[in-house]
Amino acid sequence: MNQLARLRWQCRRGTKELDLLLQRYLETDYLAADDEEKALFAELLELEDDELFGVLMGDSEVEAGELKLLVEKMRAFAAAGV
């Protein structure tokens, strides 16, 4: 399974909100991202579903600086309705 297909599979989390947000990011911003942001996205996908949902929906925060920037980018992406 290639990298993109594996990530697409990992983006399927079973909740509509997470699935849509993660898959939209993967199909748009991820493809244009640099290697560092791609690695951060893979790290983000390692979070448990409930933790990931809380982080992306703004109910909780992540500590890591660069990861926090990616989360903020994804939240803005979701708020813009892209």
Image (cartoon, rainbow, N blue to C red):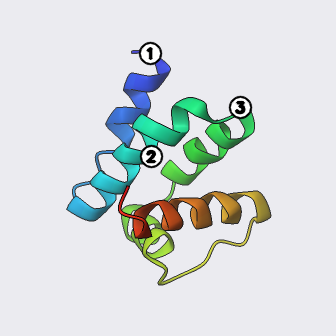
Task: Give the label, 1 or 2, closer to the camera.
Answer: 2
Task: Give the label, 3 or 1, closer to the camera.
Answer: 3
Which residue is disc 3 drawn over? Answer: 35
Residue 13 pos. (x, y %): 29, 53
Q: Which mark is residue 2?
A: 1
Mark 3–mark 1 CB contact (< 8 Å): no
**Mark 2–mark 3 distance (CA, rounded to whole Å):** 15 Å
Callout 2 amino acid: Tyr
**Mark 2 or 3, nearer chain start:** 2
Q: Which mark is residue 25?
A: 2
Q: Is residue 15 visible?
A: no
The residue located at (35%, 62%) in the rendering is 81
Residue 34 pos. (x, y %): 70, 33
Q: Which mark is residue 66?
A: none
Task: Give the label, 2 or 3, closer to the camera.
Answer: 2
* Rendered view: 49 above or below 42: below
Callout 1 amino acid: Asn
* Rendered view: 14 above or below 58: above
* Rendered view: 39 above or below 56: above
**Mark 3 or 1, nearer chain start:** 1
The residue located at (69%, 62%) in the rendering is 69
**Mark 1–mark 2 distance (CA, rounded to whole Å):** 18 Å
